[in-house]
Amino acid sequence: MSIDGSAPTSDSPQAGSSTFGPKGPPLWYRLFHRVIGNFYFNRLSLLHPERVPDSGPVLYLGLHRNGAVDGFVYNTVLPGCVYLVSTQLLQGLLARLFFTGIPVSRSKDKVRVNTSESLLHGRELLLAGGRLFVFPEGTSDLGPRHLPFKSGAARILADFLETGQPITVVPLAIAYESPWSFRSNVEIVVGQPISTELSEEERKKPVAALRKRITPALEEIGVNVESEEYQELAQKIAYSATLGTQASYYEILKTIEHNIPEKISDAWQELEAELEKAPAQPLCHQGVPLFPVGARSVYWVLLLVLAPFTLAAFVLNLPPLLGAWWAGRKFSDAPNTISLWRILIGGPLLMLWVAAVATATAVTGLWLAGCCYAAISWLGLRSYYRVRKLATAVYNSVRFPRLRKRVLETHRTVLDELSEAGAES
Protein backbone atom coordinates (compact mmCIF):
# COMPACT_ATOMS: atom_id res chain seq x y z
CA MET A 1 0.00 0.00 0.00
CA SER A 2 1.52 3.25 -1.03
CA ILE A 3 1.23 6.68 -2.52
CA ASP A 4 3.47 8.38 -5.02
CA GLY A 5 3.67 12.11 -5.43
CA SER A 6 4.47 11.94 -9.14
CA ALA A 7 2.49 14.02 -11.56
CA PRO A 8 -0.13 12.33 -13.72
CA THR A 9 0.48 11.59 -17.37
CA SER A 10 -1.92 12.68 -20.03
CA ASP A 11 -2.59 9.13 -21.19
CA SER A 12 -3.05 7.66 -17.73
CA PRO A 13 -6.28 5.74 -17.19
CA GLN A 14 -8.66 7.07 -14.60
CA ALA A 15 -8.46 5.81 -11.07
CA GLY A 16 -11.89 4.31 -11.42
CA SER A 17 -15.43 5.42 -10.77
CA SER A 18 -15.89 3.46 -7.55
CA THR A 19 -15.98 5.54 -4.39
CA PHE A 20 -16.04 4.72 -0.71
CA GLY A 21 -18.53 6.00 1.82
CA PRO A 22 -17.57 7.55 5.16
CA LYS A 23 -17.74 4.11 6.81
CA GLY A 24 -14.86 2.94 4.66
CA PRO A 25 -14.41 -0.33 2.74
CA PRO A 26 -17.03 -3.07 2.76
CA LEU A 27 -17.44 -4.95 6.03
CA TRP A 28 -15.82 -8.00 4.42
CA TYR A 29 -12.42 -6.32 4.18
CA ARG A 30 -12.56 -4.89 7.67
CA LEU A 31 -13.33 -8.30 9.16
CA PHE A 32 -10.89 -10.13 6.91
CA HIS A 33 -8.00 -7.83 7.77
CA ARG A 34 -8.76 -8.17 11.46
CA VAL A 35 -8.68 -11.96 11.14
CA ILE A 36 -5.34 -11.77 9.28
CA GLY A 37 -3.81 -9.41 11.83
CA ASN A 38 -4.86 -11.43 14.86
CA PHE A 39 -3.97 -14.76 13.26
CA TYR A 40 -0.55 -13.93 11.88
CA PHE A 41 0.66 -11.81 14.79
CA ASN A 42 0.79 -12.75 18.44
CA ARG A 43 -0.17 -9.39 19.95
CA LEU A 44 -1.17 -6.09 18.38
CA SER A 45 -0.88 -3.16 20.80
CA LEU A 46 -2.18 0.35 20.12
CA LEU A 47 -0.18 2.98 22.00
CA HIS A 48 -1.94 6.27 22.86
CA PRO A 49 -5.40 5.20 21.63
CA GLU A 50 -6.85 8.34 23.25
CA ARG A 51 -5.37 10.29 20.31
CA VAL A 52 -7.64 8.51 17.81
CA PRO A 53 -10.44 10.93 16.79
CA ASP A 54 -13.98 9.92 17.64
CA SER A 55 -15.61 11.63 14.69
CA GLY A 56 -15.10 13.88 11.71
CA PRO A 57 -12.82 13.52 8.69
CA VAL A 58 -9.41 12.08 9.51
CA LEU A 59 -6.25 11.88 7.43
CA TYR A 60 -3.96 9.15 8.78
CA LEU A 61 -0.30 9.29 7.79
CA GLY A 62 1.39 5.97 8.48
CA LEU A 63 5.06 5.08 8.45
CA HIS A 64 5.66 2.14 6.12
CA ARG A 65 7.86 -0.76 7.28
CA ASN A 66 6.75 -4.24 6.34
CA GLY A 67 5.26 -4.01 2.88
CA ALA A 68 1.52 -4.34 2.32
CA VAL A 69 1.28 -6.22 5.63
CA ASP A 70 1.38 -2.80 7.31
CA GLY A 71 -2.08 -2.18 5.90
CA PHE A 72 -3.44 -5.34 7.53
CA VAL A 73 -1.97 -4.32 10.88
CA TYR A 74 -3.13 -0.71 10.79
CA ASN A 75 -6.59 -1.77 9.64
CA THR A 76 -6.86 -4.29 12.47
CA VAL A 77 -6.59 -1.59 15.14
CA LEU A 78 -8.02 1.31 13.09
CA PRO A 79 -10.84 -0.20 11.02
CA GLY A 80 -12.89 1.80 8.59
CA CYS A 81 -10.00 3.54 6.80
CA VAL A 82 -9.76 3.82 3.04
CA TYR A 83 -6.21 3.43 1.78
CA LEU A 84 -4.40 4.92 -1.15
CA VAL A 85 -3.15 1.65 -2.57
CA SER A 86 -0.63 0.83 -5.27
CA THR A 87 -2.17 -0.35 -8.53
CA GLN A 88 0.04 -3.46 -8.43
CA LEU A 89 -1.88 -4.64 -5.37
CA LEU A 90 -5.19 -4.51 -7.24
CA GLN A 91 -4.20 -6.70 -10.19
CA GLY A 92 -5.76 -10.15 -10.30
CA LEU A 93 -8.43 -11.97 -8.34
CA LEU A 94 -6.11 -13.05 -5.51
CA ALA A 95 -4.87 -9.49 -4.94
CA ARG A 96 -8.41 -8.06 -4.90
CA LEU A 97 -9.35 -10.68 -2.33
CA PHE A 98 -6.90 -9.07 0.09
CA PHE A 99 -6.73 -5.42 -0.98
CA THR A 100 -9.07 -2.57 -1.76
CA GLY A 101 -8.75 1.19 -1.80
CA ILE A 102 -8.17 4.19 -4.01
CA PRO A 103 -5.57 3.16 -6.63
CA VAL A 104 -2.45 5.22 -7.16
CA SER A 105 0.62 4.45 -9.23
CA ARG A 106 4.29 4.74 -8.42
CA SER A 107 7.07 5.21 -10.94
CA LYS A 108 7.89 1.48 -10.83
CA ASP A 109 4.29 0.29 -11.27
CA LYS A 110 3.41 -1.11 -14.69
CA VAL A 111 -0.27 -0.16 -14.44
CA ARG A 112 -0.72 3.61 -14.42
CA VAL A 113 -3.61 5.71 -13.13
CA ASN A 114 -4.26 9.42 -13.10
CA THR A 115 -2.76 10.59 -9.82
CA SER A 116 -4.82 13.79 -9.73
CA GLU A 117 -8.01 11.77 -10.13
CA SER A 118 -6.99 9.49 -7.27
CA LEU A 119 -6.24 12.43 -4.98
CA LEU A 120 -9.62 13.89 -5.88
CA HIS A 121 -11.30 10.67 -4.72
CA GLY A 122 -9.41 11.02 -1.45
CA ARG A 123 -10.62 14.58 -1.04
CA GLU A 124 -14.23 13.53 -1.69
CA LEU A 125 -13.95 10.82 0.93
CA LEU A 126 -12.75 13.33 3.51
CA LEU A 127 -15.51 15.78 2.60
CA ALA A 128 -18.00 13.00 3.33
CA GLY A 129 -16.51 12.63 6.82
CA GLY A 130 -14.48 9.53 6.01
CA ARG A 131 -11.02 8.41 7.09
CA LEU A 132 -8.26 8.34 4.51
CA PHE A 133 -5.00 6.49 5.10
CA VAL A 134 -1.81 7.45 3.25
CA PHE A 135 1.73 6.04 3.37
CA PRO A 136 3.80 9.17 2.65
CA GLU A 137 6.98 7.17 1.99
CA GLY A 138 5.40 5.55 -1.05
CA THR A 139 7.05 2.20 -0.38
CA SER A 140 8.42 0.28 2.59
CA ASP A 141 11.82 -0.63 3.95
CA LEU A 142 13.06 -2.26 7.16
CA GLY A 143 16.19 -0.12 7.18
CA PRO A 144 17.48 2.14 9.95
CA ARG A 145 15.39 5.18 9.04
CA HIS A 146 12.37 6.27 7.04
CA LEU A 147 12.46 6.74 3.27
CA PRO A 148 11.92 10.16 1.65
CA PHE A 149 8.36 11.42 2.05
CA LYS A 150 6.28 12.08 -1.07
CA SER A 151 4.02 15.11 -1.51
CA GLY A 152 0.72 13.30 -2.16
CA ALA A 153 -0.58 13.56 1.41
CA ALA A 154 0.25 17.27 1.58
CA ARG A 155 -1.51 17.82 -1.74
CA ILE A 156 -4.68 16.10 -0.54
CA LEU A 157 -4.62 18.06 2.71
CA ALA A 158 -3.97 21.42 1.03
CA ASP A 159 -6.85 20.79 -1.38
CA PHE A 160 -9.18 19.84 1.47
CA LEU A 161 -8.29 22.89 3.57
CA GLU A 162 -9.50 25.13 0.77
CA THR A 163 -13.04 24.08 1.69
CA GLY A 164 -12.64 25.64 5.14
CA GLN A 165 -13.83 22.48 6.89
CA PRO A 166 -12.00 21.10 9.94
CA ILE A 167 -9.94 17.92 9.68
CA THR A 168 -7.74 15.88 12.01
CA VAL A 169 -4.35 14.76 10.71
CA VAL A 170 -2.85 11.90 12.70
CA PRO A 171 0.69 10.49 12.24
CA LEU A 172 1.21 6.79 12.94
CA ALA A 173 4.24 4.58 13.46
CA ILE A 174 4.57 0.82 13.59
CA ALA A 175 7.16 -1.32 15.38
CA TYR A 176 7.57 -5.04 14.71
CA GLU A 177 9.63 -7.15 17.09
CA SER A 178 10.39 -9.44 14.14
CA PRO A 179 8.68 -8.30 10.92
CA TRP A 180 9.15 -11.57 9.01
CA SER A 181 8.27 -13.96 11.84
CA PHE A 182 4.97 -15.75 12.33
CA ARG A 183 3.26 -14.73 15.59
CA SER A 184 5.53 -11.79 16.38
CA ASN A 185 4.38 -8.84 18.52
CA VAL A 186 3.57 -5.50 16.91
CA GLU A 187 3.01 -2.05 18.38
CA ILE A 188 1.15 0.72 16.56
CA VAL A 189 1.82 4.23 17.81
CA VAL A 190 -0.61 7.14 17.49
CA GLY A 191 1.16 10.48 17.37
CA GLN A 192 -0.06 13.94 18.29
CA PRO A 193 -2.38 15.52 15.68
CA ILE A 194 -0.64 17.76 13.17
CA SER A 195 -1.74 21.39 13.11
CA THR A 196 -3.43 22.50 9.89
CA GLU A 197 -3.54 26.22 10.67
CA LEU A 198 -1.64 28.10 7.98
CA SER A 199 -0.34 31.64 8.10
CA GLU A 200 -0.94 34.10 5.27
CA GLU A 201 2.57 33.45 4.00
CA GLU A 202 2.13 29.65 4.17
CA ARG A 203 -1.12 29.83 2.20
CA LYS A 204 0.87 30.99 -0.81
CA LYS A 205 2.57 27.57 -0.95
CA PRO A 206 0.36 25.32 1.19
CA VAL A 207 1.70 22.00 -0.08
CA ALA A 208 5.28 22.87 0.83
CA ALA A 209 4.19 24.28 4.21
CA LEU A 210 2.16 21.20 5.10
CA ARG A 211 4.92 18.88 3.96
CA LYS A 212 7.31 20.67 6.34
CA ARG A 213 4.91 19.88 9.20
CA ILE A 214 4.29 16.30 8.19
CA THR A 215 7.98 15.38 8.01
CA PRO A 216 8.97 16.24 11.63
CA ALA A 217 5.69 14.82 12.98
CA LEU A 218 6.42 11.44 11.43
CA GLU A 219 10.08 11.58 12.42
CA GLU A 220 9.08 12.32 16.00
CA ILE A 221 7.15 9.07 16.38
CA GLY A 222 9.31 6.97 14.06
CA VAL A 223 12.56 5.29 15.05
CA ASN A 224 15.48 6.58 12.98
CA VAL A 225 19.00 5.42 13.80
CA GLU A 226 22.43 5.97 12.31
CA SER A 227 23.14 2.59 10.73
CA GLU A 228 21.94 -0.97 10.20
CA GLU A 229 24.46 -2.18 12.79
CA TYR A 230 23.09 0.22 15.39
CA GLN A 231 19.54 -0.78 14.45
CA GLU A 232 20.27 -4.47 14.93
CA LEU A 233 21.80 -3.91 18.37
CA ALA A 234 19.02 -1.54 19.45
CA GLN A 235 16.35 -4.05 18.45
CA LYS A 236 18.03 -6.82 20.44
CA ILE A 237 18.30 -4.59 23.50
CA ALA A 238 14.69 -3.43 23.17
CA TYR A 239 13.41 -6.99 22.93
CA SER A 240 15.57 -8.04 25.87
CA ALA A 241 14.07 -5.22 27.92
CA THR A 242 10.55 -6.58 27.34
CA LEU A 243 11.38 -10.02 28.74
CA GLY A 244 9.72 -10.50 32.10
CA THR A 245 8.49 -6.89 32.13
CA GLN A 246 5.60 -4.77 30.88
CA ALA A 247 8.00 -2.51 28.95
CA SER A 248 6.99 -1.30 25.50
CA TYR A 249 9.29 -2.49 22.73
CA TYR A 250 8.67 0.74 20.81
CA GLU A 251 9.28 2.98 23.83
CA ILE A 252 12.60 1.27 24.52
CA LEU A 253 13.65 1.76 20.90
CA LYS A 254 12.81 5.45 21.15
CA THR A 255 14.77 5.74 24.40
CA ILE A 256 17.95 4.39 22.79
CA GLU A 257 17.28 5.83 19.32
CA HIS A 258 20.25 8.19 19.49
CA ASN A 259 22.31 6.75 22.30
CA ILE A 260 22.67 3.34 23.92
CA PRO A 261 23.83 3.66 27.56
CA GLU A 262 27.52 2.82 27.79
CA LYS A 263 27.07 0.10 30.41
CA ILE A 264 24.50 -1.66 28.21
CA SER A 265 26.71 -1.41 25.15
CA ASP A 266 29.74 -2.75 27.04
CA ALA A 267 27.76 -5.57 28.65
CA TRP A 268 26.28 -6.62 25.30
CA GLN A 269 29.67 -6.59 23.59
CA GLU A 270 31.15 -8.73 26.37
CA LEU A 271 28.24 -11.17 26.05
CA GLU A 272 28.59 -11.47 22.28
CA ALA A 273 32.36 -11.91 22.61
CA GLU A 274 31.78 -14.79 25.03
CA LEU A 275 29.21 -16.34 22.75
CA GLU A 276 31.62 -16.20 19.82
CA LYS A 277 34.23 -18.11 21.83
CA ALA A 278 31.79 -20.91 22.63
CA PRO A 279 32.24 -24.12 20.58
CA ALA A 280 28.54 -24.01 19.68
CA GLN A 281 26.00 -21.21 19.63
CA PRO A 282 22.93 -21.12 21.89
CA LEU A 283 19.50 -20.73 20.38
CA CYS A 284 18.16 -17.21 20.08
CA HIS A 285 14.65 -15.85 19.96
CA GLN A 286 14.52 -12.65 17.91
CA GLY A 287 18.29 -12.33 18.21
CA VAL A 288 18.47 -12.79 21.98
CA PRO A 289 19.69 -15.97 23.75
CA LEU A 290 17.08 -16.96 26.31
CA PHE A 291 17.59 -18.75 29.62
CA PRO A 292 15.22 -19.51 32.51
CA VAL A 293 15.12 -16.58 34.93
CA GLY A 294 13.77 -18.66 37.79
CA ALA A 295 13.55 -22.37 38.47
CA ARG A 296 14.17 -24.40 35.33
CA SER A 297 11.55 -26.93 36.44
CA VAL A 298 8.79 -24.35 35.96
CA TYR A 299 9.88 -23.79 32.36
CA TRP A 300 9.94 -27.55 31.79
CA VAL A 301 6.41 -27.97 33.13
CA LEU A 302 5.01 -25.12 31.03
CA LEU A 303 6.77 -26.44 27.94
CA LEU A 304 5.48 -29.98 28.46
CA VAL A 305 1.95 -28.66 28.93
CA LEU A 306 1.85 -26.26 25.97
CA ALA A 307 4.18 -27.83 23.41
CA PRO A 308 1.90 -30.81 22.57
CA PHE A 309 -0.88 -28.44 21.50
CA THR A 310 1.49 -26.43 19.32
CA LEU A 311 2.99 -29.56 17.75
CA ALA A 312 -0.43 -31.13 17.19
CA ALA A 313 -1.76 -27.91 15.63
CA PHE A 314 1.24 -27.86 13.30
CA VAL A 315 0.66 -31.45 12.19
CA LEU A 316 -3.09 -30.96 11.74
CA ASN A 317 -2.52 -27.90 9.53
CA LEU A 318 0.70 -29.01 7.82
CA PRO A 319 -0.30 -28.38 4.15
CA PRO A 320 -1.18 -24.65 4.48
CA LEU A 321 1.71 -24.01 6.87
CA LEU A 322 4.21 -25.60 4.49
CA GLY A 323 2.68 -23.67 1.62
CA ALA A 324 3.09 -20.39 3.48
CA TRP A 325 6.68 -21.22 4.43
CA TRP A 326 7.50 -22.13 0.82
CA ALA A 327 5.92 -18.93 -0.52
CA GLY A 328 7.97 -16.79 1.84
CA ARG A 329 11.17 -18.38 0.58
CA LYS A 330 10.20 -18.60 -3.08
CA PHE A 331 8.63 -15.24 -3.87
CA SER A 332 9.95 -12.69 -1.39
CA ASP A 333 12.74 -10.50 -2.74
CA ALA A 334 13.47 -8.70 0.54
CA PRO A 335 12.81 -9.22 4.26
CA ASN A 336 9.89 -6.77 4.16
CA THR A 337 7.92 -9.02 1.76
CA ILE A 338 8.34 -12.37 3.53
CA SER A 339 5.25 -11.99 5.73
CA LEU A 340 3.19 -10.69 2.82
CA TRP A 341 3.84 -13.74 0.65
CA ARG A 342 3.21 -16.07 3.54
CA ILE A 343 -0.17 -14.44 4.08
CA LEU A 344 -1.10 -14.23 0.39
CA ILE A 345 -0.44 -17.92 -0.20
CA GLY A 346 -0.95 -19.37 3.27
CA GLY A 347 -4.24 -17.54 3.86
CA PRO A 348 -6.19 -19.05 0.94
CA LEU A 349 -4.58 -22.46 1.53
CA LEU A 350 -5.68 -22.36 5.16
CA MET A 351 -9.23 -21.38 4.19
CA LEU A 352 -9.39 -24.26 1.72
CA TRP A 353 -7.95 -26.63 4.30
CA VAL A 354 -10.43 -25.60 6.98
CA ALA A 355 -13.26 -25.88 4.47
CA ALA A 356 -12.10 -29.39 3.56
CA VAL A 357 -11.94 -30.42 7.21
CA ALA A 358 -15.39 -28.95 7.87
CA THR A 359 -16.82 -30.76 4.84
CA ALA A 360 -15.25 -34.05 5.90
CA THR A 361 -16.65 -33.57 9.40
CA ALA A 362 -20.16 -32.93 8.08
CA VAL A 363 -20.05 -35.87 5.66
CA THR A 364 -18.69 -38.40 8.14
CA GLY A 365 -20.61 -37.07 11.12
CA LEU A 366 -17.45 -37.12 13.24
CA TRP A 367 -18.37 -33.91 15.03
CA LEU A 368 -16.22 -34.63 18.06
CA ALA A 369 -13.15 -35.02 15.84
CA GLY A 370 -13.98 -31.77 14.07
CA CYS A 371 -14.36 -29.94 17.37
CA CYS A 372 -11.07 -31.38 18.59
CA TYR A 373 -9.36 -30.17 15.41
CA ALA A 374 -10.70 -26.64 15.97
CA ALA A 375 -9.80 -26.57 19.66
CA ILE A 376 -6.29 -27.94 19.18
CA SER A 377 -5.62 -25.57 16.28
CA TRP A 378 -6.74 -22.57 18.36
CA LEU A 379 -4.74 -23.60 21.43
CA GLY A 380 -1.67 -24.31 19.31
CA LEU A 381 -1.91 -20.92 17.66
CA ARG A 382 -2.30 -19.12 20.98
CA SER A 383 0.62 -20.93 22.59
CA TYR A 384 3.06 -20.86 19.65
CA TYR A 385 4.87 -17.68 20.66
CA ARG A 386 5.30 -18.77 24.28
CA VAL A 387 6.36 -22.29 23.31
CA ARG A 388 9.14 -20.94 21.09
CA LYS A 389 10.48 -18.86 23.97
CA LEU A 390 10.15 -21.70 26.47
CA ALA A 391 11.83 -24.21 24.16
CA THR A 392 14.70 -21.80 23.50
CA ALA A 393 15.26 -21.15 27.20
CA VAL A 394 15.02 -24.81 28.21
CA TYR A 395 17.35 -25.99 25.46
CA ASN A 396 19.96 -23.35 26.29
CA SER A 397 19.80 -24.15 30.01
CA VAL A 398 20.54 -27.81 29.27
CA ARG A 399 23.06 -27.33 26.48
CA PHE A 400 24.87 -24.19 27.73
CA PRO A 401 24.44 -23.98 31.52
CA ARG A 402 27.64 -21.94 31.97
CA LEU A 403 26.31 -19.11 29.81
CA ARG A 404 23.19 -18.62 31.90
CA LYS A 405 24.80 -16.36 34.50
CA ARG A 406 26.35 -14.07 31.89
CA VAL A 407 23.10 -13.76 29.90
CA LEU A 408 21.03 -12.98 33.00
CA GLU A 409 23.59 -10.43 34.21
CA THR A 410 23.41 -8.69 30.84
CA HIS A 411 19.63 -8.68 31.02
CA ARG A 412 19.74 -7.14 34.48
CA THR A 413 22.15 -4.47 33.26
CA VAL A 414 19.77 -3.62 30.44
CA LEU A 415 16.82 -3.24 32.80
CA ASP A 416 18.73 -1.21 35.40
CA GLU A 417 20.31 1.19 32.92
CA LEU A 418 17.11 1.73 30.98
CA SER A 419 15.28 2.40 34.22
CA GLU A 420 17.79 5.12 35.04
CA ALA A 421 17.44 6.47 31.51
CA GLY A 422 13.70 6.88 32.09
CA ALA A 423 12.41 4.19 29.73
CA GLU A 424 8.73 3.44 30.20
CA SER A 425 7.80 0.07 31.61
Image (cartoon, helix red, strand yellow):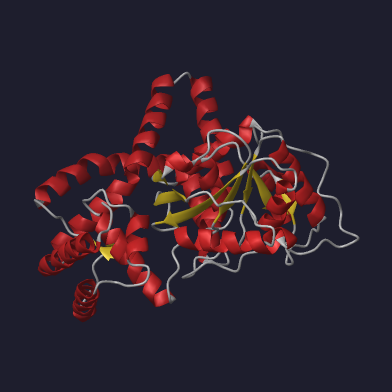
Q: Is residue 287 above or below residue 98?
A: below
The answer to whether residue 2 is left or right of residue 240 is right
Residue in the image at 41% along x and 30% along y:
374
Residue 269 location (% of width, % of height): 23, 78
Residue in the image at 62% along x and 59% along y:
136
The answer to whether residue 101 is left or right of residue 303 is right
Residue 212 location (% of width, % of height): 60, 64
Q: Nearer the viewer, residue 364 or 202?
A: 202
Residue in the image at 73% along x and 45% along y:
123
Regarding residue 4, the answer to whether it shows in the image is no
Q: Is residue 136 above or below residue 119?
A: below
Total number of numbered labels?
0
The answer to whether residue 147 is left or right of residue 300 is right
The answer to whether residue 44 is left or right of residue 137 is left
Residue in the image at 61% along x and 35% along y:
56
Regarding residue 200, the answer to whether it shows in the image is yes
Furthest residue to the front? Answer: 200
Residue 283 location (% of width, % of height): 26, 64
Image quadrant of residue 107?
Answer: bottom right
Residue 298 location (% of width, % of height): 12, 46
Furthest residue to the right? Answer: 11
Q: Nearer the viewer, residue 411 or 370?
A: 411
Q: Nearer the viewer, residue 64 or 157?
A: 157
Image quadrant of residue 126?
Answer: top right
